[in-house]
Amino acid sequence: MKLLKNIFKDVFSESISEAILSDRDKTIFSTFSFLGNQNNPSDAILRNGDVIEVKKTKVKALNGILRNY
């Protein structure tokens, strides 16, 4: 789940192409005003913008097998 949250942060901040980790972090910190923590519900808040919440859900497939997305 943590990997999925990091992918969303990269997509919203357009930092996927950053090869240097410190440059990626700077880009992410300049994009978001809050990156969430264990005690607060939102995963990230865009500067002057929307809240991002990543949730794991179970969807019943047509063949009856439960799959996680």
Image (spheres, grey):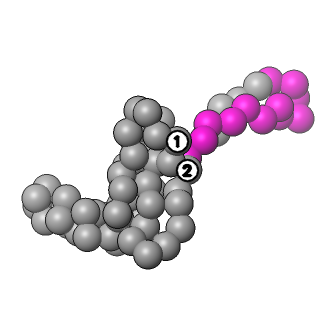
Q: Is residue 11 above or below residue 58?
A: below
Three-letter amino acid code at disc 2?
Glu
Query: Does the magenta run of residues contain 24?
Result: no
- Kindly indicate the quadrant of the structure image that contains residue 47: bottom left
Q: Position of residue 40 (x, y in %)?
A: 46, 40
Q: Outermost residue, top direction?
A: 65
| Residue occupying the point 55% across, 47% down | 54
Q: Answer left or right for 46 relative to 52.
A: left
Residue 7 visible, this orientation: no
Contact? badges 1 and 2 (CB < 8 Å): yes
Horizontally, is 69 left or right of 52 in the view?
right
Residue 44, horizontal then vertical, whole percent: 43, 54
Instruction: Please provide the residue range marked out in magenta.
Output: 54-65
- What residue appears at the point 69 percent right and 36 percent down from the top-left corner? 57
Residue 41: assigned label: 1
Question: What residue lies at 46% left-to-right and 48% top-to-bottom?
Answer: 43
Task: Name the mark on residue 53.
Answer: 2
